[in-house]
Image (cartoon, rainbow, N blue to C red):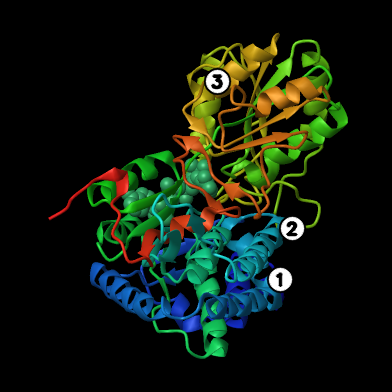
Amino acid sequence: SASIAADPAHSLAAEATGLLARLGVPPEKLKAGSLEVRSPIDGSLLARLQTHTVADVQAAIERAHRAFLSWREVPAPRRGELVRLLGEELRAHKSELGRLVSLEAGKILQEGLGEVQEMIDICDFAVGLSRQLYGLTIATERPGHAMRESWHPLGAVGIISAFNFPVAVWSWNAALALVAGDSVIWKPSEKTPLTALATQALFERAAERFGTAPDGLSELIVGNRTVGEVLVDDRRVPLVSATGSTQMGRAVGQRLAARFARALLELGGNNGMIVCPSADLDLAVRAILFAAVGTAGQRCTTLRRLFIHQSLYQPLIDRLVRAYDAVSVGNPLEAPTLVGPLIDRDAFERMQQALSDARAEGGTVIGGERLLADRYPDAYYVRPALALMPAQSAVVRRETFAPILYVLSYGELSEAIHLHNDVPQGLSSSIFTTDLREAERFLSATGSDCGIANVNIGPSGAEIGGAFGGEKETGGGRESGSDAWKTYMRRATNTINYSHELPLAQGIQFAI
Ligand code: NAD
């Protein structure tokens, strides 16, 4: 009716309920509990969910542990078949799930869909992997012996995820864990549980089609850090993959270390780009814009620090100021929008604090103000900010999860690389240059110290085929492609004697 259309709060909740129903989550589940889920688009209430208790979490862990005990015996290519079916469900429901990501996390529609595409891609990757999971044959010093390395399923894997990639992070972990023979227990961000319910429903459809998946193979627990901590502390969970702030990772990492569990940590970034004198500036401007303002600066790989050679400094700033002026900020469901809202008021306040710190540290700030407050009094839209800094001061060295790009100039490449690496985080990095020597130096052992280092593309938007993660306070974990699967399995070294002798290693004689 006209009155519903005129009431955007009502229409977002209604739309989310409809999308969830199509994805397999019944409306009754959305009004039962105390966890309020709000859309960052207008701040309206989308649902109230029931949260899990400590006892619920322990029961979920027990189910997942039991599921692991039988799943590990299923041949890996057959496990891959389940992940193939999950990929099919995601393909069939890409538009609904992508739109729900936009509603719940505030990403523009293209990025919501892109996130689901990433889930599909990692499923494809994992299906292929399910016929590989290669071990090694190793030369042995003893005659009549063989030595090899095998990979076995590990156990129930805990997955703690952040609001900004509400569903892709689960799939990067779950697709690999499931083909590896593990079960998974997911604790999504308390800010984005609806997309998690939808993903779980799609998994359950795939499991039903598969026919013989054990109960508890994929468990979902809803709640805040308290339920996350139960997962972190439970001995039946040998690996926890945790994505979020460095503060969270420091807490989780220490608790896991205390019980000798494996930690896969994907934490904050403070990603930089160096623009050299030979750079193709047309490419650089586009790359900077996407990497710095895309997802409203709320990607772990968002470009936050820009080092411009002094010979290009003013012309590049002028171009960036023009490009920033042209960026449309607004409702992420509407077509021209490139930058949607921040996740919530806290994020807005942290951004304003960082901009005020930047000014106090001698910076000049362009942009950064709140927009659309009249239309959306309960949502937080901002103009992305450029902060021209005299030095890499304290505010530049910390991650503020908002669209602020700190800009510095440099004279020598070695100075730029030094500054680039002189921060606590080490996730992603890039250089723009057409000089082979500069590019290779940036990628070398004395170049960028990050887990991801790129040439002539920005630091954000990684493909699933490579290992994803970073060094230092980013946590050291690697997810997704390359050999990241090894983290989800345990390695066994086997020595087999097929001779009639018993030669000892290291030439030891031990005769009786
Ligand atoms: P957050 O740290 O506030 O929360 C992340 C998750 O951890 C949530 O599910 C939360 O409930 C849980 N959590 C928090 N403290 C916990 C504890 N002590 N024990 C167990 N669980 C706990 O992060 P956020 O605001 O949702 O996300 C933004 C942050 O995530 C940024 O720092 C960003 O860089 C980072 N991030 C990193 C990557 C990566 O791959 N490196 C990817 C996405 C986001």
Q: Quadrant of the N terminus?
A: bottom right
Query: Dot 1: what SS?
Result: helix
Please state which amino acid type lies under the numbered disc 2.
Gln
Q: Earlier in the sequence, mark 1 or mark 2?
A: 1
- Seen at 82% across and 29% down, the residue is 322
Please state which amino acid type lies under the numbered disc 3.
Ala
Residue for badge 2: 110
Mark 3, ligand 1, within 8 Å: the answer is no
Mark whose residue sits in front, 3 or 2: 2
Q: Position of residue 35 (x, y in %)?
A: 39, 65
Please state which amino acid type lies under the numbered disc 1.
Ser
- Seen at 42% across and 70% down, the residue is 182
- Seen at 83% across and 24% down, the residue is 279
Residue for badge 3: 358
Q: Earlier in the sequence, mark 3 or mark 1?
A: 1
Q: Answer yes or no: do the residues labelled 3 and 1 have beta carbons within 8 Å?
A: no
Q: Answer yes or no: do the residues labelled 1 and 2 have beta carbons within 8 Å?
A: no
Q: Position of residue 226 (x, y in %)?
A: 29, 57
Above or below — where is 473 with respect to 419? below
Q: Earlier in the sequence, mark 3 or mark 2?
A: 2
